[in-house]
Image: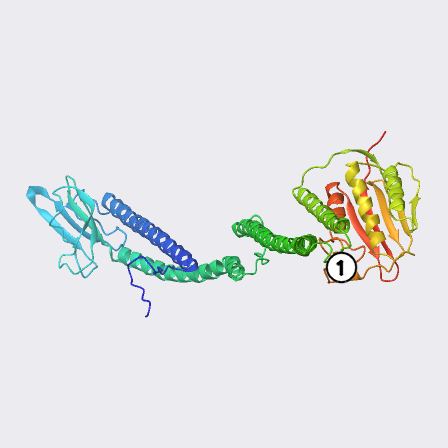
Amino acid sequence: MTDRVVAGTGRGTRKRGVPLRISLVALTVLLVAVGLLASGIAVTSSMRQDLIARADEGLTNAIRTWAEPRGFLGDGPGPPGPRRPPSPYYVESIVYGPGGVSTDNVYNQFDDAPDLDGLARDNAGPVTVPSVDGDGPQWRVVKRSNSFGRSIVATPMSDIDDTVSRLIWLQIGIGVLVVLLIGVLSYVLVRTGLRPLRRVEETAHEIAEGNLTRRVPPAPANTEVGSLSDSLNRMLGQIQHAFASTAASEQQARASEERMRRFVADASHELRTPLTSIKGFAELYSQHGVADVPDLPDVTDAMRRIDDEAGRMNLLVEDLLMLARLDAARPVDSAPVDLLGLAADAVQSARAAAPDREIRLDVVAGDRPPVVLGDGPRLVQVLRNLIGNAVNHTPTDASITVGVTVDDRPDTGEAVLTVTDTGPGLTAEDAEHVFERFYRGDSSRHRGDGGGSGLGLSIVAALVAAHGGRVGVDTSPGAGASFWVRLPLADVD
């Protein structure tokens, strides 16, 4: 089935617009054309009025001087004398004589004559009249009367019309050239000015395709494009940060979900082992009795085995509960704690629990005592877990050294606890994952002698982080391992 877009429905259609550069150029050309037209009309009208005013001034001067009707002494009145200057005027005069006798005189150098029928009786003008035959030019006419007679002076407006016509065509030609030149220059300037916006458009396309690191090329800050580029780059930075935060949150959520699945699977596995043992001993006792089971000489031994497995399960549950409380970010108690005393007690307890192992305390004196703010029992648990880890994962002939020192730097001071052994050490992979929950060097999950649940070192890392400290290990295969804990020093007067 083919999708069709129906025009005019307003849905699925996209109106075609005029590009901005075309609109700007067209508007500029239109404004220039209107401006030139207005100025041309004004200049032409002003020029025509000026030429007409000059012609009227000549006519007025003529009618007041040499063309004025007057009489002569002796011979009586007569027409204007021969002394009048030659001029391009049409002159018609009527001179009154004695007894009502009048003399008509016409001076015309032109092929046409003005139509004077519509003039006033005595004085008129300057006014514009047509030619007698209607095909000739228009005329400017002045008429004056006095006691000697009547005179009419006219001049054709053909020169004025020709001058105005030439001016109009000159303005049209110049206007067309100016409009074309302005149009070309405007297009070039607009295209050049909009080039940064084109780069903005290209950048937007790249960002839409997924390249969130792309940025709009900078422009001068005092320009509109520069301001737009700066605003867009800020917006793009915030968008990229938001996407990165979202991606990080999603990745963190997936990692947390994966850790939770592993945690549940490992916890289920660790809990299943003692539960299976307890259930097995209980079923053997209930079905066959103690006497029928060769591995159980008496009831006391069976109960002891069940109690051992229950104890292991109890310790595992306590470790899981502690990790859950630490994951909930519950605050720990905060009080001054002397790490030297804690280390000495932990070493004594370890010697009593493993009398066949060489465990010693190494203290490096400093200017400040190794006192930190924290929860004493939890810090004791940190030391016991580290020492127990060294005892359980090193041979009996390996020595264990518990160190206490102070790193008193000017910017920050830290108390340093170390548990170093001379055992086989760890591989780089084991050292990277040793503080993860349920992680053990071998991939098997069965319990060997001295084996643990894989939670001891993860509890150490969580407790140290809750105290604002750091934990790590320096090791290599065959060179032993040195676990270290750094905690901020307390300000003790």
Render colour scheme: rainbow
Residue found at the very far bottom of the displayed protein:
1
Work out whether 446 lies above or below 118: below
The three-letter code of the residue at mark 1 reads Pro
Vertically, is 434 above or below 120? Answer: below
Q: Name the residue nearer the viewer: 284 or 154.
A: 284
- Residue 480 vertical placement versus 327 (above, below): below
x%, y% of residue 247?
A: 58, 54
Which residue is the extreme one toward the front? Answer: 291
On-image quarter of the C terminus: top right
| Residue 108 left/right relative to 169 | left
**Does residue 432 appear left or right of residue 178 in this picture?**
right
Q: Residue at x 17, y 54 (%)?
A: 130
Relative side of 12 to 237, left or right: left
Other residues around mark 1 within 10 Å, as few (<14) / some (14–19) / many (≥20): few
Left or right of 287, for residue 138 = left
Task: Compare residues 199 and 264 and report the one nearer the observer.
Answer: 264
Which residue corresponds to the image point at 82% horizontal and 45% vertical from the top-left? Answer: 384
Q: Quadrant of the N terminus?
A: bottom left
Residue under label 1: 294
Q: Position of residue 419 (x, y in %)?
A: 86, 49
Secondary structure, mark 1, is loop
Mark yes or no: residue 464 visible.
Answer: yes
